[in-house]
Image (cartoon, helix red, strand yellow):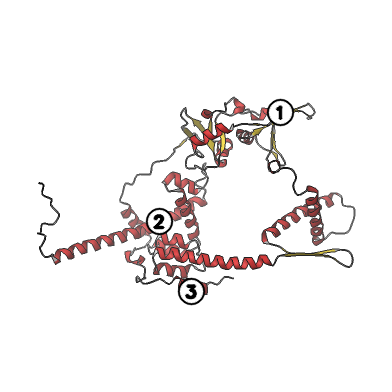
């Protein structure tokens, strides 16, 4: 038999050693204090990180091909995309919240508390919210924020319901035959009406300016009345359902065949109802679009219209989606994508899996109009390059840490005259039952909804 030995050298029935127990207790408490101290440094360092993120975002440091600052953080620092978005949101929110910022910089409140509070904090409310943050735990703050947002939302919904129920439109014919209209509209309907009247007013102004015949001055209120009539006439003339939904919402680009050739300066292209677009934009739109060939005569008349064909067959599109699983640009992975021909079909590139790659709209534009390039290997591996030719790595390595980060940060804080107190972040909560309704009632008393 093998003897099983434990750490204790005392026999099982030996009395406990009080001095050794006290020593162990002191060691554990010292370990806890070290954890608290390091946590305070982490909160202060996280604040510094948020400041850098805010500056980086404001200066568009991520704009070299990435969709947003969060996508760059996901690619460069390994942050989960959701966590990266939260970092960017909190970073910008803290710019308007000096009291919360100062408390976090001194390690007095954690990032978890600040992240929750920045969902509801304003310069007017941050002082009261900071008091709650110092009184409670992160779990308490999360719940208070949820309850506060819910109570505000319910109050706003009640007000919105009453406001919506007050909408009306009345019209009657006055004694002299003029029609008098009075209305109270929902905000979105009113905004649409005002935009329509503004557009019609500009149209009438241009028409009157060209056809001015010496008539008296037209005042702005009169021109708005004329514009409302034009809006009504246009709606009736246009009909309520012009064509099928698919036809109504198509975007059509007319492209000369020569304009699609790489580095071609011949031909032209235009977006229907918009006007001229660049040849490279036409190539991007043609990458993944239905195609209809038309033959024109010398005078521009249409001689023949071919069948509508899809550039990417459905089966091939499914296979490509299975292989790529989203946008292939480093740090993106957006699922809603265009299909990009690595060698454009207008240049002789084949529409087959080995020549296709999924790119989101943003990165499809980057490859066509912004000078980025992509190379596709035989097994579907992609290499993206910046306009200057540098390779964009799929996942860059983290920078090496050559010194103890706590020591480095201690020096940074000392230069700013900030001394961290590990006990400053202790909540004043004594472990009793938390009456959340009192906290919400107090916040309502301090900041009623206007």
Earlier sequence position, callout 3 versus callout 1: 1
Earlier sequence position, callout 2 versus callout 1: 2
- Can you identify the residue that label 1 sits on? 306
Task: Please tell me how crowded label 2 is: few (under 14), some (14-19), or many (20+) other residues with Cα within 10 Å.
Answer: some
C-alpha distance separating marks 2 and 3: 30 Å
C-alpha distance separating marks 3 and 1: 72 Å
Residue 17: percent from left, percent from top: 13, 65
- Placement of the C terminus among the 4 image quadrants: bottom right
Residue 343: percent from left, percent from top: 56, 28
Earlier sequence position, callout 2 versus callout 3: 2
- Pointers 3 and 1 in contact (C-beta within 8 Å): no
- For the residue labelled by badge 3, is the local secondary structure a helix, a strand or a loop? helix
Q: Nearer the viewer, mark 3 or mark 1?
A: 1
- For the residue labelled by badge 2, is the local secondary structure a helix, a strand or a loop? helix
What mark, if any, has residue 46 been given in the picture?
Answer: 2
Q: Kindly tell me whether residue 414 is visible in this rendering.
A: no
Residue plotted at (60% across, 33% down): 287
Q: Is residue 345 above or below residue 73?
A: above
Task: Please tell me how crowded label 3 is: few (under 14), some (14-19), or many (20+) other residues with Cα within 10 Å.
Answer: few
Query: In the rendered view, does 244 fall on the left or right side of 14?
Result: right
Q: Is residue 108 above or below residue 382?
A: below
Q: Nearer the viewer, mark 2 or mark 3?
A: 3
- Pointers 2 and 1 in contact (C-beta within 8 Å): no
- Can you identify the residue that label 3 sits on? 442
Query: In the rendered view, does 137 fall on the left or right side of 347?
Result: left
Residue 175: percent from left, percent from top: 89, 68
């Amino acid at each position: 038999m093998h003897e099983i030995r434990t750490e204790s050298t005392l026999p099982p029935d030996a009395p406990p050693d009080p001095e050794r127990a006290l020593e162990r207790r002191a060691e554990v408490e010292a370990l806890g204090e070290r954890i608290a101290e390091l946590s305070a440094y982490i909160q202060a360092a996280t604040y510094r990180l948020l400041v850098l993120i805010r500056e980086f975002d404001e200066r568009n440091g991520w704009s070299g091909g990435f969709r947003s600052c969060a996508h760059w953080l996901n690619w460069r620092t390994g942050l989960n995309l959701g966590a990266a978005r939260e970092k960017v949101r909190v970073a910008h929110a803290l710019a308007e919240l000096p009291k919360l910022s100062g408390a976090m910089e001194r390690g007095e409140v954690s990032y978890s508390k600040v992240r929750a509070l920045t969902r509801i904090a304003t310069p007017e409310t941050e002082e009261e919210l900071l008091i709650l943050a110092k009184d409670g735990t992160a779990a308490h703050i999360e719940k208070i924020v949820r309850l506060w947002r819910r109570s505000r939302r319910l109050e706003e919904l009640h007000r919105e319901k009453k406001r919506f129920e007050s909408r009306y439109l009345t019209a009657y014919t006055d004694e002299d035959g003029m029609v008098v209209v009075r209305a109270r509209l929902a905000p979105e309907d009113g905004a649409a009406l005002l935009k329509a009247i503004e557009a019609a007013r500009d149209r009438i102004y241009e028409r009157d300016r060209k056809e001015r015949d010496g008539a008296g001055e037209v005042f702005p209120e009169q021109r708005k009345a004329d514009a409302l009539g034009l809006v009504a006439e246009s709606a009736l003339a246009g009909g309520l359902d012009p064509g099928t939904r698919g036809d109504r919402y198509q975007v059509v680009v007319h492209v000369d065949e020569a304009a699609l050739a790489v580095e071609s300066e011949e031909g032209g292209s235009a977006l229907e109802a918009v006007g001229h677009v660049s040849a490279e934009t036409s190539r991007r739109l043609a990458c993944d679009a239905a195609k209809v060939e038309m033959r024109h005569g010398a005078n521009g008349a249409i001689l023949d219209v071919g069948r509508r064909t899809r550039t990417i067959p459905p089966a091939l599109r499914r296979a490509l989606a299975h292989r790529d699983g989203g946008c292939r640009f480093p740090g993106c992975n957006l699922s809603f994508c265009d299909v990009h021909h690595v060698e454009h079909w207008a240049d002789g590139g084949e529409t087959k899996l080995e020549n296709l790659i999924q790119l989101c709209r943003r990165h499809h534009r980057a490859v066509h109009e912004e000078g980025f390039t992509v190379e596709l290997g035989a097994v579907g591996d992609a290499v993206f390059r910046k306009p200057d030719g540098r390779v964009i790595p799929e996942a860059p390595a983290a920078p090496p840490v050559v010194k103890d980060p706590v020591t480095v940060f201690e020096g940074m804080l000392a230069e700013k005259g900030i001394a961290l107190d590990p006990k400053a972040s202790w909540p004043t909560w004594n472990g009793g039952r938390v009456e959340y309704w009192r906290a919400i009632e107090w916040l309502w008393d301090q900041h009623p909804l206007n």
